Image (tube, rainbow, N blue to C red):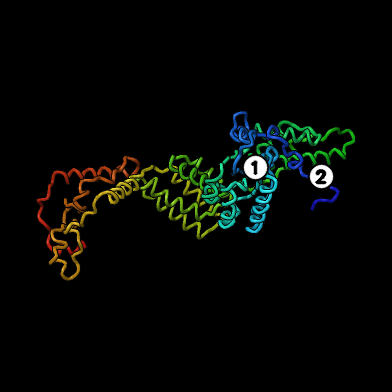
């Protein structure tokens, strides 16, 4: 147990007192104009669409979509400040339909009495349910309200199509290292502190594109450096070193919204398909670290085993299926070992999509060509009266032939000459390709003149 007189504890306590005595650095550094915003140059640069719309005060309803800490709320406030419109803010986490209707009513009165439009900033707009979003539609359509929605989730998943279609979508990007370092430098200046370049680089790397996170950890690092200065009579300005940055940084949960879920799993499967085990294991680690359901990952592996490997390695499906069972039986954290095993196996296995491609080609013919009848010799002849209908007549039982194969057709005439399954020369499928080529060549020269097998033989094959 550490002592209360431990210098590290004293520094931490002093840093905590300092942090509680003032408002957060990220709040104090909120930009006052578009020129103060760090990053998002694709929107706010000299030719940025958003900047041009704001400067001429012609912005209609918009949705700002981007990760946390990229400036969505800041941009909403700056847009409002640059316009002549009234600014009203609601949080979708706590607002109700009644609150929305009250805002609309006030906006109508304001427009009628003063001729002033209203901007409604709705933070976390994806948290509004369908009824709440629908309540906004009439006011947005008529221009009573100009909606500025902010969301960290993909609006194509979370925002109703009618509301989304009436809004311009602006996607904010995570801040790059250059932008984060500029933001951290401004933060040091605001705090009256200095810092080592390696400390700032470390903080930028840990922020994962989140400007608010970068400033929050910087503030803690400055507080730690200041607390240390209080015990050093020769110290000047607080100076943030790498040790301060490391102490201020704690592991944070990976950003993993609904769209990230689909993007990461897509990268995972494509890495397996591309035979890159290192990339596949990286995306697996991303999913597991973000709390992805391991059963979902296992299901994707089972699908990939047939879709991307197929007959090139028959064991792939067995490995994937065994992994899915192991995940259910073992559970996390140990099941991650099984998932890693299957991921590496599938990524390094030979690849073939011939079975899947063949099914797709057959499905296309089923949809586009006439549905031919089942040939008589293939129809069910087991029930009473079937023989009188000619069902099963002429069927040749393959096992009655020396090599278990006989030339006869198994498809309707409409697709009799189609080849759907086209095996590759990859892995074990090369053996299948050679055998199939032999059978197809025999079929092309043998004709249909072989003697028909007896009825009893036919019945054995039904």
Q: Is residue 9 visible?
A: no
Give the CA distance from mark 1 to mark 2. 24 Å
Q: In the rendered picture of this protein, how many numbered marks are placed on residues?
A: 2
Tag of residue 72:
1
387 w.r.t. 179: above or below: below
Q: Nearer the viewer, mark 1 or mark 2?
A: 1
Q: Is residue 215 visible?
A: yes
What residue is rendered at 16% in x and 61% in y? 392
Place of residue 77 in the rendered image (x, y in percent of width and height, measured from the top left): 69, 42
Residue located farthest toward the front when viewing the structure as drawn: 113
Give whichever of discs 1 and 2 has the lower sequence position. Answer: 2
449 w.r.t. 381: above or below: above
Place of residue 279 in the rendered image (x, y in percent of width and height, measured from the top left): 51, 40
Residue located farthest toward the top when viewing the structure as drawn: 46
Choose between 102 and 272: the one closer to the eye: 102
- Mark 1 lies on a secondary structure that is helix
Tag of residue 8:
none
Estimate how packed mark 1 is, as few (under 14), some (14 to 19) or many (20 or more) residues with alpha carbons within 10 Å. many
What residue is rendered at 66% in x and 53% in y? 103
Disc 1 vs disc 2: Cβ atoms closer than 8 Å?
A: no
Q: Write down the quadrant of residue 197 in the picture.
A: top right
Q: Quadrant of the C terminus?
A: bottom left
Q: Horizontal placement of 115 versus 433: left or right? A: right
Residue located farthest toward the bottom when viewing the structure as drawn: 384
Choose between 167 and 216: the one closer to the eye: 167
Choose between 320 and 68: the one closer to the eye: 68
Place of residue 55 in the rendered image (x, y in percent of width and height, measured from the top left): 65, 33
Q: Which residue is mark 2?
A: 22
Choose between 44 and 373: the one closer to the eye: 44
Q: Horizontal placement of 303 versus 455: left or right? A: right
What residue is rendered at 23% in x and 52% in y? 370
Residue located farthest toward the right when viewing the structure as drawn: 233
């Amino acid at each position: 147990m550490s002592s209360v007189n431990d210098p590290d504890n004293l520094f931490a306590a002093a840093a905590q007192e300092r942090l509680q005595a003032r408002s957060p650095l990220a709040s104090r550094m909120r930009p006052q104009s578009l020129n103060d915003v760090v990053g998002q140059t694709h929107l706010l640069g000299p030719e940025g669409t958003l900047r041009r719309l704001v400067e001429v005060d012609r912005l209609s309803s918009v949705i700002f979509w981007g990760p946390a800490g990229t400036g969505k709320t800041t941009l909403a406030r700056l847009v409002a400040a640059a316009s002549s419109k009234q600014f009203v803010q609601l949080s979708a986490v706590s607002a109700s339909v009644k609150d929305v209707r009250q805002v609309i009513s006030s906006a109508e009165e304001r427009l009628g009495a003063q001729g002033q439009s209203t901007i409604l900033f709705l933070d976390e707009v994806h948290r509004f349910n369908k009824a709440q979003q629908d309540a906004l539609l009439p006011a947005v359509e008529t221009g009573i309200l100009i909606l500025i929605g902010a969301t960290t989730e993909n609006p194509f998943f979370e925002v109703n199509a009618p509301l989304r279609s009436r809004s311009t979508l602006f996607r904010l990007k995570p801040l790059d290292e250059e932008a984060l370092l500029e933001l951290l430098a401004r933060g040091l200046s605001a705090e009256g502190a200095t810092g080592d370049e390696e400390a700032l680089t470390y903080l930028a790397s840990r922020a994962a594109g989140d400007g608010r996170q970068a400033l929050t950890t910087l503030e803690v690092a400055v507080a730690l450096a200041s607390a240390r200065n209080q015990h050093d009579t020769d110290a000047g300005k607080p100076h943030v070193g790498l040790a301060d940055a490391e102490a201020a940084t704690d592991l944070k949960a990976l950003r993993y919204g609904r769209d990230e879920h689909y993007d990461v799993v897509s990268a995972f499967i494509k890495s397996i398909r591309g035979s890159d085990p290192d990339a596949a294991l990286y995306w697996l680690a991303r999913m597991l670290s973000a709390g992805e359901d391991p059963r979902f990952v296992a299901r994707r592996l089972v699908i990939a085993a047939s879709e991307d490997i197929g007959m090139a390695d028959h064991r792939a499906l067995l490995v994937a299926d065994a992994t899915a069972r192991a995940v259910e039986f073992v559970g996390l954290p140990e099941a991650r070992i099984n998932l890693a095993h299957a991921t590496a196996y599938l990524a390094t296995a030979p690849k073939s999509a011939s079975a899947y491609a063949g099914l797709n080609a057959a499905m296309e013919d089923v949809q586009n060509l006439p549905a031919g009848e089942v040939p008589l010799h293939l129809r069910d002849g087991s029930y009473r009266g079937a023989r009188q209908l000619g069902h099963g007549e002429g069927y040749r039982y393959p096992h009655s032939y020396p090599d278990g194969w006989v030339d006869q057709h198994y498809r309707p005439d409409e697709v009799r000459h189609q080849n759907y399954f086209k095996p590759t020369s990859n892995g074990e499928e090369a053996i299948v390709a050679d055998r199939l080529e032999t059978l197809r060549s025999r079929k092309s020269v043998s004709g249909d003149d072989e003697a028909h097998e007896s009825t009893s033989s036919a019945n054995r094959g039904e």
